[in-house]
Every structure is written in structure tokens, then in C-alpha cells.
Image (tube, rainbow, N blue to C red):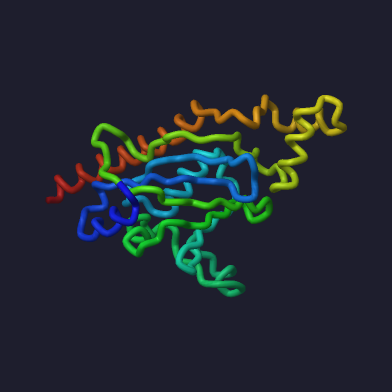
Amino acid sequence: MELGRAICKIGGMNHADRIARIRIQLDDWQPAIWRRVEVPLTATLKALHDVIQAAMPFDDYHLFEFRADGKRYAIPDPEWDSLRDRTYSAKTMRLGTLVDRGITQLAYTYDFGDDWRHTITIEAIADADPTVEYPSYIGGAGRGPPEDVGGIPGFELFLDAIADPKHEQHRELKRWHGRPFDRAQVDDGEVRARIGKLARRRALGKAGFEKNRRQTG
């Protein structure tokens, strides 16, 4: 469904019955490195962060933030708030709430040292498929950067060195990474497995909630 129409129709509808199709794209890099996923509208921004980590993939070693509608969403830190702008909790802000406000794009930054900036685009809103466990991975292009490679400049150096056996840092970086790296190849199997773990965790949480509701109802 076209996004504008879908958002207009979403008011009053149970977010549990709806999903967002989302494109995740690494900024400042060509050819584009991107992933497409489907995420429940009930997901918090912290849950969306977990999906992004699984999809790129990263290892969730560092801090992150989302920016949308002029606000910062992350894990609140009094020290940050005292020095910079106010932080709203990514653990309580739900994707559906932002969609209801008409927001279709978010900025996401992971690791303030390497400074991996991404554009998160909500491409469509649709009914959830009852046969699918969410979040789900749709596809993507381009191998994501290794953790702690040194940001965009470090990634450029890494790719040059890995591709050229005569490069002075070829052996060092090959040993540092520890496995083959094909810049054009997404490891779909790894991404599906990692997002599948998130989906199973969500399914178990839903089952536990329903069981508790029945027992206390």
C-alpha cells in the first residue's frame, strides 16, 4: 500500500496487526549498502536498533541514537543530557507512534567513534502476515563494514588492503578480520539467522504475555 494512504488509514487500528517495511541504508557510501526488513509497528526504537544490528550486521558493542522530528532517541544518559540535547528513551518510543505522527524517515547513528550514520526509511505499512514471524529480513545489497574498522576512511583502507595482496597492510588487516570479505556479497544466511533469533524472542515474549493474561484474567 502507498505509504501516505496507509498512514491515513492507520488511526484507530491496532498496531499489533500492522507491520512497516523499512529500508536501512548506510550514509556516505557508494555503491549503496542497504537492507530491507519488515518490523511490527509495536516495536520500540530499541527493538529497531536490534534489527539494524542484526541486518548490517554489527555486534552491538557501542552506543546508538535515532533522530526524528527534531528529537533524539537513545538510552538516556544524564551526562549526555547535561551537556547536549535531551534524550528520549528508545525503549519506550514505539515505531507505530512515530508513524501515527507522519514520520517516514529517521536518522540512525551507531558507534560515535566510527560514526556509522544510516538513513532509515519507512517505505510501506501493511497488514501483518499471520504465517510470518516478525521481524523478518527481505533482502539487501553490499557487505556491511566490520566492527571497529575506523569509520568511512578506515573502511576504504580496509577494502583496498584486503583486495591487494601487495598492499603494505594486507596481511595485518586480513589477520585482524579473520575471515574472507567480499564487499559485494551480503551474507544472507547470517542475517536471516540473526533476525530469526529476534523473531523467536519476540514470539516467546508474546506467548508468555498471553499465558500470563489468561492466568490473571
Left or right: 213 as drawn, with respect to 79 = left
Up-down: is 63 above or below 149?
below
Residue drawn where x is 23% and y is 60% of the image:
11
Closer to us: 28 or 167: 28
Counting the numbered discs, the total is: 0
Left or right: 100 as drawn, with respect to 197 = left
- Where residue 148 sits, quadrant-wise, is top right
Residue 40: percent from left, percent from top: 33, 46
Left or right: 123 as drawn, with respect to 65 = left
Residue drawn where x is 56% and y is 51% of the image:
118
Up-down: is 205 above or below 184?
below
Residue drawn where x is 50% and y is 62% of the image:
67
Residue drawn where x is 35% and y is 64% of the image:
101
Residue 85: percent from left, percent from top: 55, 72
Residue 156: percent from left, percent from top: 74, 41
Left or right: 216 as drawn, with respect to 26 = left
Residue 81: percent from left, percent from top: 55, 71
Report the residue that reaches farthest toward the bottom: 82
Closer to us: 215 or 194: 194
